[in-house]
Amino acid sequence: MTFLDSIVVKRDGGVNSREQLDELARGAADGSVPDYQLSAWLMAAYVKGLDPKETADLTLAMAHSGERLDLTGLPRPWLDKHSTGGVGDKTTLVVLPILAACGVTVVKMSGRGLGTTGGTIDKLESVPGFRTDLMPEEMVAQAKRIGIALSGQTPRLAPADKALYALRDVTGTVASIPLITASILSKKIAGGAETVVLDVKCGSGAFMKSLTEAESLAHSLVETGRLCGLQMRAVITDMDQPLGSTVGNALEVKEALAVLDPSYSSTLDDTEEDDTDGRRRFFNLCVGLAGHALEAVGKGNHEDALAAVRSGRALTKLKVWFEAQGCSIDLDQDVNWQEPRTKRDVVLDGESGYVSRVCAKTVGEVALELGAGRVTKDDPIDPTAGVTVMRGIGSKILPGEPLFEMQSSRDVDWGQLSTRLRQAVSVSSEQVGGVRPLIKIVD
């Protein structure tokens, strides 16, 4: 039987066997199956779909196409957290230190951003000296010492995923829920995780625009993960407005540091009535996600996650993590690394009221043009570029008050970008409540 037979089976709506999917993953990883045949199979799978068993078999085949991290000897539980990404999504930078401070071992591979969805690797590379190229043995050794290790994807782990994703990106087959599921979970299995907590974003600033799409992906991830032997927990969270108060790499690292500071959490209560810039919403989501993760592995709950922040243990863990991966600055003292060449305010003109809409998609597009992201994988990034959201949904605003602050070290059309940001905001005469970040739990 040749790989052509696997293509024909899927083209005609049949079910590929585990052996056929193993051959697919091996061939993608070592180049023995040519790109044109892999592309043909991907299109057939995109059109005809994969059933739950096929999706699980493909996931395992991709995970086993390279090495798997051996976490033997590291404190259990072994957990990985994944977000499907969105505008201003810097949850990993906050959630991982909380979990590690609560005794969870977190080993994670993260990616770079493309388009309006920022990548965790880009955010961390805005920190001077921070290494994102750890080898597998370095990841295990670091996790054993401090409970956290994070790196970009290495060719030694799930190489089939890297090859297949590159082809999906150029063949119009990215938006397939089974293929997305296999791509995400194969890296989690290769990374040694036993439990995976998923944050599926939903809204204008996310890949999944509607709740129906987000639910389909969340259910696929949970079902497939369990078929692969993983313990799973998924939540669907809002991405109709930017998450937190910043969009941009160094800006988001700075915000993560701020919300982990015990002095910030001590000012909060359980309401969101005065969440002017959305930072409280971001904080509550991170603590909520960490709480769900602790519950999933039997290490605590929301109150334990909150206590890790308020005691300062989570912030200390972040600083230890950054130092372990090469951070060469004093995070408490050195601030110039976050400073761009130019800053501009976007103000409200001619009306007053309450902010009723902040379009995450538009804010992400403006941040992209400022230099905070990339259109193609080879585009350079300005780590200092980005947008600060000064007024979130539900906040009161008067004429002349700032809505946003833009910053960049590039020569950009500030007037045109200001106009677009102003159009991203709607103002109403009556106050509307800010959208709660957590929409739904999927089990």
Image: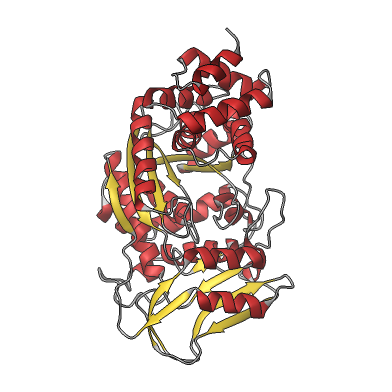
The residue positioned farthest toward the top in the image shown:
1
Q: For the point 30% across and 80% down, which residue is it?
A: 431
Q: Is residue 214 above or below residue 424?
A: above
Q: Is residue 191 visible?
A: no
Where on the picture, by quarter, is residue 391?
bottom left
Relative depth, front residue between 319 and 151: 151
Depicted 255 relative to depicted 235: above or below: below
Residue extending farthest front:
12
92 lies left or right of 43:
left
**Quadrant the N terminus occupies:** top right
Q: Residue at x 63, y 37 (%)?
A: 166
Q: How is the image coloured?
A: secondary structure
Q: How many marks?
A: 0
* Quadrant in which residue 216 is drawn: top left
Question: Image check: 5 left or right of 376?
Answer: left
Q: Residue at x 48, y 65 (%)?
A: 360
Is 45 above or below relative to 277? above
Residue 149: where, in percent of width, then height? 52, 42
Q: Nearer the viewer, residue 68 or 181?
A: 181
Look at the image and tell me in which quarter the C terminus lies: top left
